[in-house]
Image (cartoon, rainbow, N blue to C red):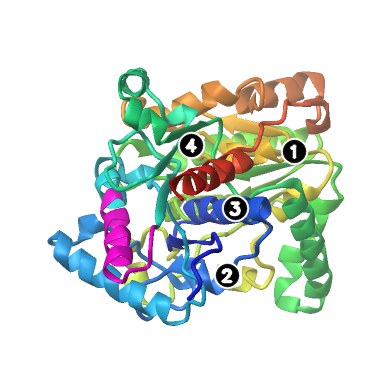
Amino acid sequence: METTEITAFALGTPNVGYLNQLYGAFRALSELLGTSQKKEKMFLLPKGISDVSDLKDTVSFSKYADYDSFKADVYGMLDVYFQSCDVVPRVFITAYDQTENERDGKNIDAICRVIKEYYQDKKLGDVFTTVLTSRLHKYKYVDLINIPKHLLTFTSRIRLLQDSRLRKKSLITIGTINNFSRQVIQEKNKDFLEVLKTSKADESLNEIVKKLEHFVNTPKKAVVCLGGRVEGPEIVFNISYAKKLCADAEKLVHNGYAVAFVNGPRTPNDVTDFLYERVKNNPNILFHNCKKIAEDDEDRMPKRWRIYSGPHEEDFKNMQKIGNIYPAILGFKNTLVVHTMDSYASCETANAAVPTAISSKGIHVDPDVRYDCHNLVQLLCPKYAIDWDEFVHITSHMKIEPKALNPQVLSSPLRVFAEAVVNRINARR
């Protein structure tokens, strides 16, 4: 195996948001170095899993009884990974899980420790470890900590000022590393229109196609991207909030808009059911399921709440023939995208120059535990995004359209991240 080329690999994750961050990091390094990365060699996966899309659970140190058993499993994963490697990756990337704040600092350090020990044991040379979108932790085995500005508290800022070593290995960015761009949106939009065209021949899709065509042909559009709950009680994303969002959507419809709701892995199943049923017979509002759908009884267990199970499984399986319509539907002119405040996806669309709104009223996000969500709203509004309730209000009274918002584009941190990684690796040589 050759070791001169700088390539990277990452710990696989079933979380779509974190996966998007990892793809963004791969893209940043590839564009800076002028290299390409084979998709099948991007991710470190558990035994028996051949593709990251098949992952249902994360590999985390906190799920193991002790470090040795965790290390043994990861060593087994690495043995399989390196069996087909022709180039030794110089960079290992992982993404911080904001829903596991109390444990994920230790989880990140543990996986990076195992990676470094494996490289040392197998005499593979140096490996540079980095974590994306992390809170400030005093990691021992992480070489570069990417900390978006909204994840810093007053206390953590003081810690950075006082600890030069920690400051030296930290990279502060505005916004998150992501794999989102205007080009990606337009490419997916083109593919979506082709799928919509060919789907007309499928009678089982008649109602879905009819709604989507109405959405496409309506001059003013809004896309509501739903976040959702987490493991703990710090975010309350319930039917009451869903009713509020529906009422907002109906106000926009009254002013000539078509509205699309798209859910995500964290959207509770009862909220998914409510919204799907509520808008099913409304020609101006559509709901498109983007959650994975249960395949067996284990997927229907409460611990698998990120997978959809419920009365509409068959409807959503049929809907899968269309595919995931997000972010393709952001490619139409005069379209506003709305993110709930618990989601970091507002950074992506603000990066991509898509008119962006953030919904923060009606959802409970504990400011002590998830201060990052509140910080992000303050960071983005009103310079890079507009408050959703304000937009609904002025639309009702002034007939304003998304194309008139002209928000400032949030600079992408991709190149800054890639340069930081490469410069630090070169400085070691």
Please tell me whether residue 244 is drawn above or below residue 187 in the rendered image.
above
Q: Give the labeled residue for mark 1.
A: 253
Residue at (28, 49) in percent of width and height: 109
Q: Please identify the residue farthest to the left as the structure is shown.
A: 65
- Determine the residue positioned at 65% across, 21% down: 390
Q: Name the residue under label 2.
A: 39
- The residue that label 3 is drawn on is 29
Q: Is residue 163 left or right of residue 408?
A: left
Of mark 4 and mark 1, the one earlier in the sequence is 4
Query: Mark 4 vs mark 2: which is more N-terminal?
Result: 2
Element type at mark 4: helix
- SS at badge 1: helix
Q: Where is residue 177 in the image (x, y as percent from the top left)?
A: 55, 44
Q: What stretch is highlighted in magenta?
A: 109-126
Residues at marks 4 and 1, CA–CA distance in whole angstroms: 19 Å
Residue 167 position, x and y percent, is 38, 28
Label 3 neighbour load within 10 Å: few <14, some 14-19, many 20+: many
Q: Distance between the residues labelled 4 and 3?
A: 40 Å
| First in sequence: mark 4 vs mark 3 | 3
Residue at the image point whose x is 66% and y is 73% from the top: 321
